[in-house]
Structures are given as structure tokens and as C-alpha cells.
Image: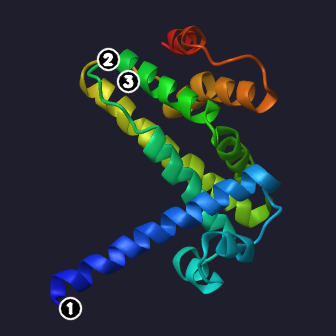
Amino acid sequence: MNERERARRPGGRSARVAAEVHQAVTDLINERGYGNFTVGDVAARAGVADSSIYRRWGNLATLLTDVALTRLNAQSPMPDTGSLAGDLRTYAAQVAREITGPDGLALLRLAVALSSQGRQGQQAGDDLLAERTRQLQSMLDRAVERGEQAPDALGVVDHILAPMYVRVLLGIGPLTPEYVDGLVDRLL
């Protein structure tokens, strides 16, 4: 095996293992709910050793945070449409699709659980909010650089994300495009 093949193989396997572990977490949250499974359960579902999970993530809370952030980043990346209104509408629509999709409720439950579970879970929830706030801030900073007036990142969380999350968590009506656009309009 040459140097190039050796360098390429671990990344491919590593990415595949991470995807399998992430899917196992999502499936277990859907089936059992947060807090009703262990690293051992995730490992068994993913077909990997417990030690592989501990080596990569360290603990369940860190793994759960990684799953939530990876899903959020993959499904709802920060758009750059050239205007704040366009960015917020695109982002809000992406989030609405993600949280109403097949694993959306599980992802929301995970985010809520991480924010409210003891010290380790609280740190994971804080990490999740901090990373998402950092990403939102980059979108808002671009708007300011273009000369637009922008709210702060927590304003986006409070006025766009939180209402959608509550509706999905409580099963209150659909997230129609009109509703989602209205949230953006009210914030701006």
C-alpha cells in the first residue's frame, strides 16, 4: 500500500463510522427518547466498539452535541444570498424543512434535552447554542458589512427559531412558508 492509499483509507472509514454512529443516535432518540440509551446501545446499533465512540467523542453528551451540530450544519447551512432578508428567509425555510423532516423532532428533542440535562448535558447544550450563535453571527456580520441593519444572533433565535421549535415540539400547526416568512418579517 502506498502513502496516498494509506492516508485516504482512514478518512473514508472514519467518515463512514461517524455517519453510522450519528444515524444510530438519531434512530435511538426516535425510538426511545433522549436519556434512554447508552454509549453501548449506540455502539451496538452502529456496529462499532464502545471504545471507538469513547476514543472519538469522549462521552455521550459530546457525541450528542456533535450529532446535533453536524445535522444542523448539513441541513441548515448559513446562506449567503446577498441580502439579510434573503439570508434569513432561506435559513428559516431550511430550518423549517429540517425540523419537520423525518428525524426533525428527534433533533429538536436532542437539542432541548442537551440544554436541560445536568452539568455535562448543560455544557453540551451551551456548546450547541454557542456554535449556532457563532454561525448566525457570521451571517449577520456579512449583512452589516453590506450596510444593512441586523439584529443580534439571539434575536434570530428568539424571533425565528424558537417559535418554529415550539410549534414542532408541541404539534401546533404546520410551518407553512407564509408563517416562516412572517417570522422573518416581524424580526426585520
Counting from the top left corner in percent of width and height, residue 95 is at 53, 31
Image depth: mark 1 or mark 3 in front = 1
Query: For mark 2, what is the residue?
Result: 148
- Vertical side of 185 occupied by 116: above or below: below
**Residue type beneath disc 3:** Asp
The percent position of residue 46, horizontal first and vertical second, equals 61, 70
Badge 2: residue crowd in 10 Å (few <14, some 14–19, many ≥20): some
Q: Earlier in the sequence, mark 1 or mark 3?
A: 1
Colour convention: rainbow
Mark nearest the camera among 2 and 1 is: 1
Query: Horizontal and vertical percent for residue 14?
Result: 42, 74
**Crowding near pointer 1: few (<14 within 10 Å), some, many (20+)?**
few
Could you tell me how far apart the alpha carbons at marks 1 and 3 are, in whole angstroms? 47 Å
Horizontal side, residue 37 vs residue 185: left or right: right
Rounded to the nearest angstrom, the CA distance separating label 3 from label 2 is: 12 Å
Q: Residue at x 76, y 33 (%)?
A: 169
The picture places residue 181, in percent across and down from the top left corner, at 52, 12
Q: For mark 1, what is the residue? A: 1
Name the residue tied to disc 3: 87
Q: In the rendered image, which quarter contains the N terminus?
A: bottom left
Residue drawn 51% across and 44% down?
Answer: 72
Going by the numbered disc 2, the residue's amino acid type is Glu
Can residue 116 be seen in this snapshot? Answer: no
Q: Which mark is residue 35?
A: none
